[in-house]
Amino acid sequence: MDQTRENTIRLPARIENLERLVDFVLSALRQAGAGEKIVADLHLAVDEACTNCVSYAYPEGEPGEIELTCRIGPNKFEISIRDWGRPFNPLKTPPPDLDLDLEDRPIGGLGVFLMKKFTDRLEYRREAKANILTIIKRR
Amino acid sequence: MTLKVKMMEKSPGVFHLAPVGSIDTASAPILEGEVNRALAASPRAMVFEMAGVDYISSMGVRVVIKTKKELARRGARFAMVEVPPPVKRVFEIINALPREEIFRSVEELDDYLSAMQKKVREGEG
């Protein structure tokens, strides 16, 4: 029997909704008994993914929606972030050059890099005109 | 978002900023606003007291890096003290701050700055 539990939230893709989106995930993780390290890592990953979405998915003046689905299974946590904006695969973002002196390093490009570092796997797919980024973290 | 930033000029030109809460996309502009207020006073050093920060995202890191760059451009110093482990981990992963700019406590920073000033005075003497 599949013991995976699934919860979904859909909100307008606006910065003022980021806190609700992140809190939705953190609360689901804590209810499922996730340790604080996992909660902290997924906090950062979900925050970065949602920030990208609300900042860049939709053209200015044409706000769309963002949907989060949290799947809690016996062995892993999966959070999918879906938007219906322009096609964008964040996994193709070039990594920042961490060897450059800070003074020479462009500010930016850190969000996706941090997401990769704080999760076990990231998957992207474009489906039915939606971008779907799935964050996977083992228990 | 829940972020409060306390700013103090602890000695002439040395501004301490103590953010309390989460530094994320929504709250990073609050910190940036306080940094700009301090920059307007032409500081010779800025110290971020981070003990009260429970979370930092890339947007918060950007504010810190931008502040450090601007201070370096002006020939002023930057330091962070009392950085909690989860916050420090983010900076370590992106290799963003040299070790000599992170101090365990304000006292450790004060000792370091006193030693630096002594060296400068001896060099001048």
Image (tube, coloured by chain):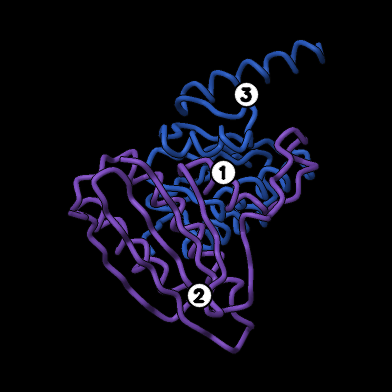
- Number of numbered discs visible in the structure rendering: 3
- Per the image, label 2 sits on a secondary structure element best described as strand
Label 1 sits on what residue type? Phe
Disc 1, SS: strand
User: Chain in purple?
Assistant: A
What residue is disc 2 on? A83
- Residue beneath label 1, please? B15
Taking the image as shown, residue A70 lies to the left or right of residue B5, namely left
As measured in the structure, the alpha-carbon distance from the residue carrying label 1 to the one carrying label 2 is 42 Å
The answer to whether any part of residue A29 appears in the image is yes
Q: Is residue A94 left or right of residue B4?
A: right
Q: Is residue B124 above or below residue A24?
A: above
In this rendering, the answer to whether A18 lies above or below B72 is: below
Q: Quadrant of residue B40?
A: bottom right
**Residue indicated by mark 3:** B100
Q: Do the numbered discs 1 and 3 sit on residues whose CB atoms are within 8 Å?
A: no
Return the residue nearer the eye: A109 or B104: A109
Q: Quadrant of residue B2?
A: bottom left
